[in-house]
Amino acid sequence: MNRVVWHTKKNADRRIRAGHPWVFSNELQNSPKGVSPGQLVELRSHQDDFLAYGYGNPHSLIAFRVLERDVQNIQPLAPANLVQLLLRAHQRRKILGVSTGSHRLIHGEADFFPGLIIDHYVLSEGLGHVFSIQAHTAGAQIVVDHCEEVLKEFCNIIDIDFNSVSVLIKNNIKFREREGLHPEPPRFALRSPSHGAELFSILVAMAPSVLPLHFEVDLLNGQKTGFFLDQSRNIHSLSMMAASCFKSRKNIRILDLCSYMGQWSAQLSSFLVEKLGVKIEAHLVDVSENALKMAIENVGKHVDQVFAHKLDVFDGLEKANFRNFDLVICDPPALIKSKKDLGSGEKGYLKLNKLAMSALAEGGLYTTCSCSSLLEEEVFKQILSKAEIHNKVGIQWLYRGGPALDHPYLLSFPEGQYLKCWTGLRI
């Protein structure tokens, strides 16, 4: 692919030299117009020093995204280089012990490919693998165009039979419009002959159990890449705290808000039943009827009673009047997607945490999350404090969590630090 050369303005190269992967259009000497979205670009400083290879987009405020800082690697988008990218990411996850079950293989900028998400779903019963790919940007779309060739070589190297592999393209996100791309209906670019069913059973290792759990999921129609894998560390920590706090209990009641396919409740229940021998009553709340069907199946394997509540948590939670739950999990979707949403989103988090916290019994554990990268940590803490005051409860905050090990982030790229999780004990 042909590349062009861009130069930064004087002193506009400081951030990228410090490791940040983006350059904005107003930091360039000349207009980025004239290149195709996703076209390979060589970035040089005002003094004409080499900075990086990356891809450009004249339609985006983020005009340049870094792919490679080695001047010798002049074709970072070549299929052979993309295979090496996957292998390096796989090796890091293998070392961390998170590659045996379903996991995130490529996490955008933190895995050195901006705009690209690849989740690797390992199917139950040895039935194969699904790679779910999401391209947020025009440059990442190039990987989609080469995905079968690249994944086939990658799987051959790590000893996965490619006949057992399906490749799912999940480019149905509105964010693509910022890049001049259209959201597309989810589709299988490749489907293994052994994957005939619409639903999949995947292996997920989250809670501190010996074996991963089997989750029934709808990858094609599910949110994001089909499932959420970023909460494993937080579910593990909550499971251990609950086992300690509730070791004298015979019954535990769980309220799981925005439960989606039930991963929090299923993992918690499986571990607590195994560890404490307790009876569990789980209440699952979600606005999606399809997600609740999956959640009932996934959670119902591990609890004595499971109840599904099809509710919008903002409109229906107050009327539902949930009270006296031992575990309350509040894990909503991102309420702040852009800066214009900051005011309404912060009010939304406050309202939701007020309602959720009111359902917590004395001595109960409360876990709340935000996956809005634009919500600052200090603001989220202030929201939780206001919710405490509103409900006239005291909470000892025990744990501040974040994304799982397969969702790394870079300190030089604060925009990638999105997930916040807090767990506390009502006293």
Image (cartoon, grey):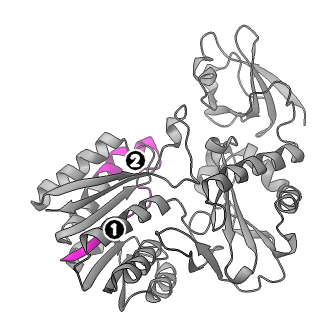
- Dot 2 or dot 1: first in sequence order is 1
The amino acid on which the numbered mark 2 sits, given as a three-letter code, is Asp
Residue reaching furthest to the top? 47
**Where is residue 319 drawn, in percent x and y?**
21, 77
Q: Which residues are magenta?
A: 322-347
Q: Number of callouts in the render?
A: 2
Where disc 1 sits, the SS reads strand
Figure check: 110 above or below 332: above
Question: In the image, what residue occupies the spot 23% across and 81% down?
Answer: 249
Residue at figure coordinates x 75%, y 81% from the top left: 127
> Can residue 112 be seen in this snapshot?
yes
> Pointer 2 and pointer 1: residues touching (CB < 8 Å)?
no
Can see residue 231? no
* The stretch drawn in magenta includes residue 346: yes
Q: Is residue 139 left or right of residue 214?
A: right
The residue that mark 2 highlights is 341
Quadrant of residue 361 in the image?
bottom left
Farthest bottom residue in view: 304
Q: Residues within 10 Å of mark 1 (few under 14, many from 20)?
A: many
**Residue for badge 1:** 329
Within 10 Å of disc 2 (Cα), the crowding (few <14, some 14-19, many 20+) is few
Q: On the picture, is 85 further left or further right than 303?
A: right
Circle 2 SS class:
helix
